[in-house]
Amino acid sequence: MTSPRYFFTSESVSEGHPDKMCDQISDAILDAILEQDPMARVACETATTTGMVVVMGEISTTAYVDIEKIVRETIRDIGYTRAKYGFDADTCGVLVSIKEQSADIAQGVDKALEAREGGMSDEEIEAIGAGDQGMMIGFACNETPELMPLTASLSHQLVRRLSKARRTGEIEWLRPDAKSQVTV
């Protein structure tokens, strides 16, 4: 009996892809805030289109960070340094709309901290909410040494190699935004 045959596809994007750019900007803002205030609550989202970045969300912290500066540094590190690349860290628009965390979410998180400090039982602590956080899952397999599906591993390798070729100047016409898809 033969095994069923099927195609499996994975994709990977480089650091200049809009989705990845947004993740890197949000991560950089979070890192800068947590460096100053480890107890900060940060729900920071980023959206981008050609020449524009919008940072929005709810943040409760005692830290001060220059969000626009972080955005521009992150974009520069990605490699968008000239308008002809479709994006320029120094001239793009940066819109920031951050407000303090909503009272409903803060209440769920605050009570959990107070409960832990107040000596509650494990059952009582488990019954307390934690704002609007969720959990994501993934999977591992034995197709590669990284325990990733072969298509994902190959796709990531291709994008890393493209990024290296761009950063070293090996292929001068490459730009920061790239995507690879691998099907086996």
Image: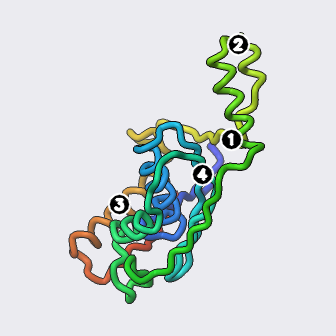
Q: Of discs 4 and 1, which sits in the foreground?
A: 4
Of callouts 3 and 1, the N-terminal one: 1
Nearer-the-camera pick, 48 or 131 = 131
Q: Amino acid at mark 4?
A: Ile
Q: Secondary structure at mark 2?
A: loop
Q: Which residue is mark 3?
A: 160
Q: Position of residue 18 (x, y in %)?
A: 52, 70
Q: CA distance from mark 3 to mark 1?
A: 30 Å
Q: CA distance from mark 2 to mark 3?
A: 49 Å
Q: Which mark is residue 134?
A: 1
- Horizontal side of residue 83 vs 53, given as left or right: left
Of callouts 4 and 1, the N-terminal one: 4
Name which quarter of the figure residue 95 lies in. bottom right
Nearer-the-camera pick, 168 or 92 = 92
Q: Of discs 1 and 2, which sits in the foreground?
A: 2
Q: Position of residue 64 (x, y in %)?
A: 46, 54
**Residue 150 seen in the current view:** no
Residue at image point 61% right, 61% down? 98
Q: Position of residue 97 (x, y in %)?
A: 61, 66
Q: Secondary structure at mark 1?
A: loop
Residue at image point 33% right, 66% down? 77
